[in-house]
Amino acid sequence: MRRSVRNVRPRGRGPVSKTIGILGELLLTAGVLILLYVAYVLWGTGIQTERAQDEMRERIETAWEPPAQESTEAPPDEASPDETTAEADSRLEVDEVFAIIRVPRLGSDWEWIVVDDVDLESLTRGPGHYPHSAMPGELGNLAIAGHRSGHGAPFHNLDRLQVGDTIEIERADGVWTYSVDQAPTVIDPSDVWVVDPVPGAAAEAEPSERRITLTTCHPRYGSSQRMFVSGVLTSGEEI
């Protein structure tokens, strides 16, 4: 006697099938979250950095403007030389701004404002100046770090630089041009000597050159190694 189809009950999923299904859903959710995080790191952080760059650029356009010409006649209550110097110094300082960097090899419109530190928070606003490295034009090694991915990736194409390319640094009190003499080189994260006053020399060595060093992560979208480019001053005021 043939059983009625209506009396046949569908089999439920076993515990193994349920577990596999749950794991599949979790992996799919994790994959979506990872993709969203990657998108945020690569593009979302860039929006924040661009906004910070615009804000700093607006401030220095005013702060770095030459002071208006004043009458040569000294008023009765003329300020002392010390007060005048203090006013000039305050005009040159704009919060965390250190300088403007331009590298023609990376594009005619490639221009970034450099902040005056290299901690994680500072580098979210742009390239950063190693605080204990030289000032522009000064004897020693002016060192600047920048992201290669995320936060606008200012040094994304640092590996394109070639010997002879120029690196321009502008501050309110001058412009300095360096010429690359050390092509992009990959090093270990522990090779911090590249930002020393005399790279590769003993710690007590006295600098005799005015140099610049740019550092970033390597490879792109990774940080297992570092990359640096170095150059020597060719023009600008020497301090």
Image (cartoon, helix red, strand yellow):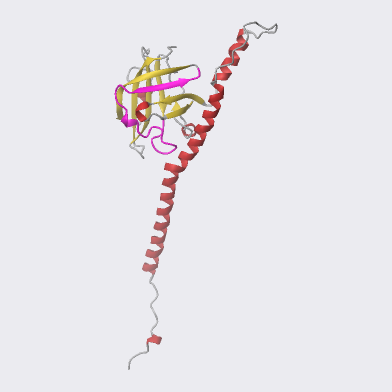
Pinpoint residue 178: horizontal percent, then vertical percent: 37, 19
Q: In the image, 181: left or right of 126?
A: left
Mark count: 0
The quadrant of the rendering that contains the N terminus is: bottom left
Along the viewing direction, whichever of 109 and 2 lies nearer the viewer: 109
Q: In the image, 60: left or right of 158?
A: right
Pinpoint residue 129: horizontal percent, then vertical percent: 45, 25
Q: Main secondary structure of the magenta part?
A: loop
**Image quadrant where residue 63 sits:** top right
The answer to whether 172 is drawn above or below residue 185 in the figure is above
Along the viewing direction, whichever of 191 and 162 lies nearer the viewer: 162
Give the magenta-colored segment's residue range: 146-172
Residue 190 appears anywhere in the view = no
Residue 236 appears anywhere in the view = yes
Q: Say whether residue 179 is magenta.
A: no
| Residue lying at 40% horizontally and 75% vertically, measured from the top left | 12
| Residue lying at 47% horizontally and 35% vertically, measured from the top left | 124
Pinpoint residue 88: horizontal percent, then vertical percent: 57, 15
**Image quadrant where residue 177 sits:** top left
Along the viewing direction, whichever of 50 and 186 lies nearer the viewer: 50
